[in-house]
Amino acid sequence: MKLKSYKNIKMSVLAYIESSKGKVKKNAFEIVSYSSELAKKLDTDLVALVLNCNDISELSKYGASKILKVTSSELENFNAKSYANIIAQAAKISNSNHIVLSSSLDTKYLAPLLSIELDAGYLSNVVELPSSLSPFTVKRTSFTNKAFSDSTIDSEFKIIGLSSNAFGLLENNVESSVEDFNPSLIEEKITIKSTEKISGKISIADADIVVSAGRGLKGPENWNIIEELAETLGAATACSKPVSDMGWRPHSEHVGQTGKPVATNLYIAIGISGAIQHLAGINSSKIKVVINNDPEAPFFKAADYGVVGDAFDVVPRLTEKLKAFKA
Amino acid sequence: MKILVCISHVPDTTSKINFTDENTVFDSQGVQYVINPNDEFGLTRAMWFKEKQSAIIEVINVGGVSTEPTLRKALAIGADKAIRIDSEPIDGLFVAKEIAEYIKSNNYDLIIAGRESIDYNGGMVPGLIAGLLQINFITNCTKLDIENNTATIEREIDGGKEILSCSLPLIIGGQKGLVEESDLRIPNMRGIMQARQKPLEVIPPSNSNSKTKSIKFYKPEPRKEVKLISSDNLDQLIDLLHNEAKVL
């Protein structure tokens, strides 16, 4: 790998933009918004790196003044090691000491590999811009959202993994210049045999709204009311741990400390009592609504809005009212 | 097949989280420690390889003497040997470097770690070890099979799953799915007795460096009181979500 280090060019912040089927993923705009503000703080430029992505016009709306564009049929499928290697090359040619990543599963997969490639300090689950540049200090969630910490990175290269929906979107229209970038490619040693995406459904990671249900639903056959509510809201569906342990719903829907963290704008919990492990998993969600027939359910103490009532009565009526509201 | 399972010693999932020394240190008073759940799914899967494919299981932890009961529990579940690298962990990189150093002088076919620990949630140790040793790495593993030196793995991806294969040696980040919750083993008396006789090797750290540091902890702000809405007045809920919370 031959790389020139352009020490004479201005330092940059590198934002890694994920894409799917040629389009930037929704989380990209938050990554660019954050990176753009970070670049201002550091008095540096912002460089956004895109891989196999044609539709990049919207990135300029959030401050991506320079876009490095990689196009290669060999990078069609995600491979953590190859992608980490390309981001490392991009960091070096763009003279970027700060690299901003999302919290998607793919990006969290490649982040530690990138950290070794660049000899960089890496912090995941970051929720704010740095409170200090020297030492470089950011706030991150810790103890599965039961706490926060101020953490420092003291290496020259720094990798910041931004927690989903922690920063939000910040419009900052700029003119973007696009530069093609042809990185050297490494040999892939892991073979992808098949990829299966649940079609027609929004994943928890991409959702603005999550509708989640627990044992109060009494059985998997009753999930139609949850799915209908989710569909009406354009929401993803999720569930509590007992529900996934009993096999009512797939593990991929299990939210909580040993399941998935959910950092969404609106989390609606139906028939979930609110065990501490579940609450930890959803703590980063902005607005929480609880529907439960037990007024003593601990979830009411962690919620913004609550309805005491039977799910089988409340949920279908709420769905109907939401349909009318949306119409 | 020789398997190394990395064990994080973490507060039980029901623990109340508090800090001491002006919020710079986790307050371990009254806290029950357990094997990190993501590591325990991996250890339990390793037991399957031991019972069905005669694998040897070793477990490793970077920590002080207070973590030994957690390692003994792993031995009681069925691991053959435990290694404790005698140092307080500073950050994920420090832990990864210490474990990678140990792996270099003790060959393993498979290294299993959790996708993340439930205390600091760095989610980086297995990936860092993979990077340091330049071996294959797959995280968010929900299924793992090994035949003839080749691993077949199911990995959770956002909105679905992916089936991957690669040759050993391999390090994985495991999670629920590797085994089910109901497959987890509670050590029986025989296991606990045997664990006392099994080797628990304590080795000095190789003084790895770290690059990050947690300097101060906070607890989330106390929440404001929940607003209760009558189940007869769901229009009010929609109105609040639309006009007050602005999420609809």
Image (cartoon, helix red, strand yellow):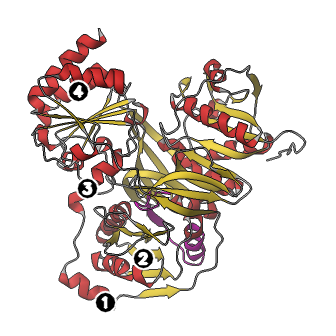
- The residue tagged 3 is B180
- The residue tagged 4 is A227
Q: Amino acid at mark 1?
A: Arg
Mark 1 and mark 3 in contact (Cβ < 8 Å)?
no
Q: Nearer the viewer, mark 4 or mark 3?
A: 4
Crowd tier of the residue under label 2, counting other residues whose Cα lies within 10 Å: few below 14, some 14–19, many 20 or above: many
Q: Earlier in the sequence, mark 2 or mark 1?
A: 2
Q: Amino acid at mark 4?
A: Glu
Q: Residue at x 56, y 44 (%)?
A: A128
| Co-location on one chain, circles 3 and 2 | yes
Q: Residue at x 73, y 22 (%)?
A: A176
Q: Which residues are magenta?
A: B96-123
* Residue A39 in view of the camera: yes
Crowd tier of the residue under label 1, counting other residues whose Cα lies within 10 Å: few below 14, some 14–19, many 20 or above: few
Please tell me whether residue B8 is drawn above or below residue A148 in the rendered image: below
Q: Would residue B103 be counted in the magenta stretch?
A: yes
Pinpoint the chain carrying mark 1: B
Mark 1 and mark 2 in contact (Cβ < 8 Å)?
no
| CA distance for labels 4 and 3 | 25 Å
- The residue tagged 1 is B196
Give the quadrant of the C terminus of chain A: top left
| CA distance for labels 2 and 1 | 15 Å
Residue A66 or residue B26, whichever sits in front: B26
Mark 2 and mark 4 in contact (Cβ < 8 Å)?
no
| CA distance for labels 4 and 1 | 51 Å
| Co-location on one chain, circles 4 and 2 | no
Report the number of discs: 4
- The residue tagged 2 is B58
Pinpoint the chain carrying mark 2: B
Task: Give percent across and percent down for residue B162.
Answer: 42, 41
